Amino acid sequence: MSMDDLGQQEAAVLAIIRENPFAGQQEIADMLGLARSTVAAHVTQLVQKGYILGRGYVLPEPSRAVAIGGAVFDRKYRAKTTIVLETSNPVDGMRSFGGVARNVAENLALLGTPTSFISILGKDETGSALLAHLRECGIDVSQVIVTPDRPTAEYAAILDPAGDLVIGLADMGIFDLFQPAHLDRVWSHLASASLVFADCNLPAETLGHLVVRRRSARFRLAVDAVSTHKVMRLPQDLSGIDLLFMNLDEANALLDRQGADSLDDAKVAARLLQQKGAREAVVTLGARGMAVAGMGGVQLFSAVKARPLDMTGAGDAMIAGTLHGLMASQDTYAAARTGALLGALTTESAASVHPELSQRFLDAHRHRLTGGKE
């Protein structure tokens, strides 16, 4: 981890804290020949920059991801016969945990990445069950906000017998309560991460605040659009976003352009997102592949061949696989291919997060990444 943003005195204070996390400020001041107030100021800066985690000088893990955004309780009801309106219909019901950021966090944790999750949940049974499941996955949920003011977010999908969506019902109002002040309260937790992922379930003002504060932080920031409606919550200036994920429709909505439904157009959109300030961008086109705008230009990749059972969660898995690759020091192009593989594997499972997922499972399927570059 680079320490280029530390002054000489800050680096000296940090070295003493690493040697002895229980050193008092006066003790550090005496060792360095500084005033105690100067040491206190340096400690505050070290917290702001993410080198220590506040009181007790707890040092952060060397490589940690934070996912911040949506956590949703999903219900699916698949009709057994043709749906008849205004009466009762027999269905098969399925329940699962969802939300883009929540899915990304679970995928990352199963791949072995130390992961924290930050969101807002209702003070209800659904919220408690969501938290318990995340803890079982080994995810740090210490910064999750629990509120009595709104219920935990829910999404209900009514499907016809073929599995196609008839109507979707979303109760997502709780996310409007996640205000910029919440980000400020957990900032040392974000600042000490090596990578932060946010989804556009967050309110526009909160996303804007995160992007602006990121410009003076050390972590890499990745963001997912979620939908053509929610992508409009992103600020016009995308500077501060290191990696932007969206499909072609979402990219065109944000860019306010009409485009062709093609990989070549995804390539143009990815380049335009960089021109708006995003350092790198991934623009996806489902089973046809993706355009990856990295520091070495825009490259096209075909999708990994799969035998899909259910597309739910595939996009979130693609994001998690990409982020996992980046944290393993892959370049963005190679990381995106890792993401494409994980997305394909997830479509071959009925669950939104593959139940067998692990680093070993992912590695066992790497042979499916033959070629792929267009």
Image (cartoon, rainbow, N blue to C red):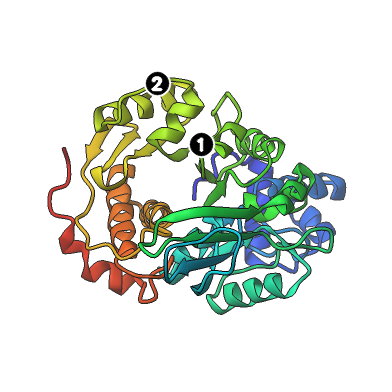
Given the image, on which type of amino acid does mark 1 rest?
Thr
Question: Residue 348 is drawn in which quadrant?
Answer: bottom left
Relative image position of residue 74 (x, y in whole percent): 56, 65
Secondary structure under the numbered disc 2 in the rendered image = loop
The answer to whether the residue labelled 2 contacts the one labelled 1, judged by CB atoms less than 8 Å apart, is: no
At a point 28% along the width and 30% down the height, the residue shown is 298
Judging by the rendered image, the residue that carries numbered circle 1 is 228
Instruction: Work out whether residue 370 or residue 4 is closer to the camera in this orientation and state it.
Output: 370
Q: Is residue 75 left or right of residue 203?
A: left
Relative image position of residue 203 (x, y in whole percent): 68, 41
Q: Quadrant of the C terminus?
A: top left
Instruction: Work out whether residue 19 or residue 306 is closer to the camera in this orientation and state it.
Output: 306
Q: Residue furthest left?
A: 371
Relative image position of residue 291 (x, y in whole percent): 30, 36
Q: In this rendering, does residue 117 appear at all?
A: yes
Q: Is residue 300 above or below residue 137?
A: above
Secondary structure under the numbered disc 1 in the rendered image = loop
**Which mark is first along the chain, 1 or 2?**
1
Q: Mark on residue 258?
A: 2
At a point 68% along the width and 65% down the height, the residue shown is 58
Question: Residue 99 is drawn in which quadrant?
Answer: bottom right
Give the total number of marks visible in the rendering.
2
At a point 70% along the width and 53% down the height, the residue shown is 188
Q: Mark on residue 366?
A: none
Question: How would you rate the neighbour count of disc 1 (Cα within 10 Å): few for under 14, some for 14-19, many for 20 or more?
Answer: some
Q: In this rendering, does residue 62 appear at all?
A: no
Given the image, on which type of amino acid does mark 2 rest?
Gln
